[in-house]
Each structure stands twice: as C-alpha cells, then as structure tokens.
Amino acid sequence: MDAGKKIKVLIVDDERAARQRLEDLLSREEDLQIVGQVASGREAIHAIGSLSPDLVFLDVQMPGLTGTEVVQEVGPEHMPAVIFVTAYDQYAVKAFDLAAIDYLLKPFDDERFEQALARVRQAISSREINELRGRLAALLSDTPQPTAPASPTPRYLERIGVEMRGQMRIVPVDQIDFITANGDYAELHVGDDALLIREQMQALAKRLDPGQFYRIHRSTIVRLDRIDTLLYGQGGDYAVRLKDGKRLKVSRNRREALEQRLGLTL
C-alpha cells in the first residue's frame, strides 16, 4: 500500500445495526475509506469484483451464502484482506483456520476493533496478503465448508466471548449460573465472577437453549439446573434459590411456565 493511499473497505453483514456499528467505527479512521456496504453473500461477490476493496469485513452467517462460501466463489487468489465478523464463536475459531487476518466476535468493543485494524495495517504494509491467500486456498481445498440450511434451524450458543482489556475470555454456557440485565449490557454470573457483555436480554434469551435457560424476570435469565428451591412468599411474591444459595426474583406471570420447565406440572 502506497504511503498516503487510503485503504478501501467493504462491509458485508445482513444485519443493518451491525453495518452501522462498523461504519461508525471506520469513519473515525483517516486512512480508511468505506467504498460499499452490502447485506448478502451474493452482493458481496459482486461488490468485491466491482469495487476492488483492500479490506472486507465479512459476516460469517448470512442467508443464502455464508462468508466462507463467498471466499470460495470469489477465489482465495482474488480475495482482499478479510476480517470475519460473527456472533458465534465456533465460527470465529474457523476464521483463523481459514487464514483470515482476524475476526470480530459480536458484540465487540472499540479496543478489540482497533486491534483488528492494527493487524490489517501490518499485513498490508508488510505485503502478507499474498501469503494469506495461499494459505486460504490450501485450507479451502481440504476443508468441507458449512452451507446455509434450506430452512432456518435453531442455533444456540455453546460459548460466549467476553472482551477483557485486550484479551477475550471464552465462557462455556454450561458454566453460567444466571444472567442479569445492566442497561444495554448483560452480566454473566459464573461462580463468583460477574462478566459484562454488550448484549440486550431479549436478544440473548433467543440465542440460549430454552431447554437449559429460562427468563424468570425481564432482567434475569437462569440456568434451570442451577435451581435448588422455589420460594413462595406472601402477597404472591416468588423467587428461586440456587444451589449456591443465591436468591433470584421470579415474575408472577412467569412462575407457572417456570414450573412447567422444571417438570413440576403436568
């Protein structure tokens, strides 16, 4: 990349909010220029060919074509630098296996974004892109690629990435005792630890296995096998006591459904 020449960036994500988030962050960088935004894999293939970006932020899971299928169709030898973006950490691990420069695990913070950009700048300035293309071509030829399902199927989180000052802690969901709301964030309670992630409760509840987790209150999700006792108070107040002794409030209108989830009613 010539000195003073801006890095041309293409954003590919089927979620409008995710595209806006990347646009906001990229607009702060003087050496970057957004040349396009698209919402599908098929559009991405066309945009890569017509816009010739230097860098693509590529969502992994999209309707139609996945991010790795986009790479396959374009051809590794023609791909610009790639940063994979995903909400599912199992795909993030594959991103490194596919020789992407980096990946961003949603929800990511500003510091993690800057780390990814630093790797891009280093790769472009040291001309590592051709080497990455070669590794990508070899891996794609040997590795079966995930295909989009013909009809939507539930995908539940197995692990959640928690950004912590320049590093990421991977938390298996089966270690989570309960989750509480904290404004626009959620707190994962793992033993004595409270780990903050940028995720709203409603969205998080949809991504957790309903056979393992239940939202007992608008601000609380609990892992069902952590519940030890149901507590019935006076005046219709309800709560649960977990196996470690913690008490969590249960909304009145969720008590019956909770009992059903626990197999206590017919």
Image (cartoon, rainbow, N blue to C red):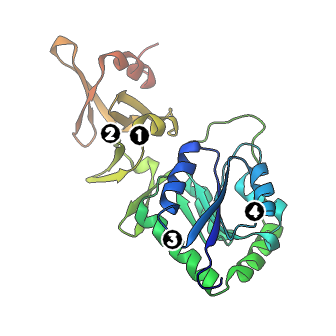
Look at the picture and state if 118 lies above or below 84.
below
Foreground residue among 174 and 97: 97
Q: Residues within 10 Å of mark 1 (few under 14, many from 20)?
A: some
Which residue shows up at 84% across the image and 60% down it?
73
Q: Which mark is residue 181?
A: 2
Q: Is there a contact, CB below 8 Å, between mark 1 and mark 2? A: yes
Q: Residues within 10 Å of mark 2 (few under 14, many from 20)?
A: some
First-in-chain label (1 vs 2): 2
Q: Residues within 10 Å of mark 3 (few under 14, many from 20)?
A: few
Q: Which mark is residue 164?
A: none
Q: Is there a contact, CB below 8 Å, between mark 4 and mark 3? A: no
Which residue corresponds to mark 4?
51
First-in-chain label (1 vs 3): 3
First-in-chain label (4 vs 3): 3
Quarter of the figure that contains the N terminus:
bottom right
User: Alpha carbon of mark 1 to alpha carbon of mark 2: how far?
Assistant: 7 Å
Residue 21 x %, y %: 50, 52
Instruction: Choose mark 4 or mark 1, whichever is in front.
Output: 4
SS for tag 2?
A: strand
